[in-house]
Amino acid sequence: MSKLIFKCEKKTLQEKTIGGSNDGNAVKKAHQLENPLESLDSVPKGGELKNGKTCEIKHFKAQQLSPALEKWLMDLMTRNMKHMYKKALDGWRPKKKWKEMTQPTSRYLIAYVDSKPVAFSHFRFDMDYGREVLYCYEIQVETERRSIGLGKLIMETLEKIASQANLPLVVLTVFKFNQPSLGFFNNLGYDVDETSPGEDEFKDYVIMSKSVC
Ligand SMILES: CC(C)(COP(=O)(O)OP(=O)(O)OC[C@H]1O[C@@H](n2cnc3c(N)ncnc32)[C@H](O)[C@@H]1OP(=O)(O)O)[C@@H](O)C(=O)NCCC(=O)NCCS
């Protein structure tokens, strides 16, 4: 799930910058990357899955998405997440979600198996409480393609991009009731981030992060 819905609210709550006097140079440089999969070293463009199939990963800026890909992204998002957002405090707001997914700095990794898109991540290079981060807004895998390593491959690709771009942290937000995803991220080494709301703030999400440098 994304951070945007809650971020403004949380900033006024905490009003803090924990990244020190960071000038954001790495984020500025990362914004210049046309395609991180092409221009950064040691970032693979795919890999082998547990079912023996090969997965190809492609990068798109939001503005580069075809109408067919845009439709698939929102469709998968809706199929995977609508029921969860309906349980959440903020509810399911598809127009707001699509606006968030198509911001000028929004980027995508899309995983293809047998030439079909089967999983994606929406991410951005961003400043977060004064820290230079790669923020993973979404990771979504088609139901029938889960548990074969696609989610892990995409997260590892994001981590390599962050590390090669000198962004020391990958950050994401998960609903507290999304137990399978919490397990998935824990398994990949993500911990509760220091900016995550405390229990006394009665939020339905947790912010997680992983250091990659
Ligand atoms: C969460 C999600 C992205 C995981 O993707 P996936 O492709 O099914 O996961 P993978 O097959 O890559 O699993 C990677 C590893 O995580 C482990 N894992 C997956 N789910 C787990 C869980 N609930 N608890 C513990 N470990 C888990 C796997 O066993 C695997 O471990 P291994 O590499 O040691 O074998 C996918 O289930 C999904 O799209 N869910 C719906 C959308 C969603 O909730 N997205 C997250 C929003 S924040």
Image (cartoon, rainbow, N blue to C red):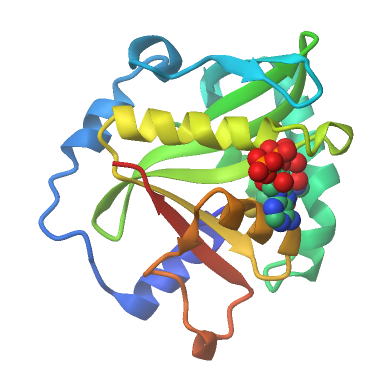
Is the residue 205 above or below the residue 50 in the image? below
Q: Residue at x 29, y 29 (%)?
A: 165
Is the residue 146 above or below the residue 161 in the image? below
Q: Front-most of 63 and 124?
A: 124
Where residue 212 sits in the image (x, y, percent)?
35, 43
Is the residue 126 above or below the residue 177 in the image? above
Q: Residue at x 45, y 31 (%)?
A: 104
Res. 105 in view: no
Q: Residue furthest right?
A: 144
Locate the C terminus and report the quarter of the image it occupies.
Answer: top left
Where residue 170 sits in the image (x, y, percent)?
42, 46
Is the residue 140 above or below the residue 15 in the image? above
119 to the left or right of 211: right
Res. 183 in view: yes
Numbered marks: total: 0
Task: Name the image quarter holding residue 149.
Answer: top right
Where residue 25 sits in the image (x, y, percent)?
16, 36
63 to the left or right of 38: right
Q: Residue furthest bottom?
A: 200
Task: Name the image quarter holding residue 85.
Answer: bottom right
Task: Name the image quarter holding residue 118.
Answer: top right
Where residue 40 sits in the image (x, y, percent)?
34, 17
Q: Front-most of 29 and 150?
A: 150
Q: Residue at x 67, y 68 (%)?
A: 90
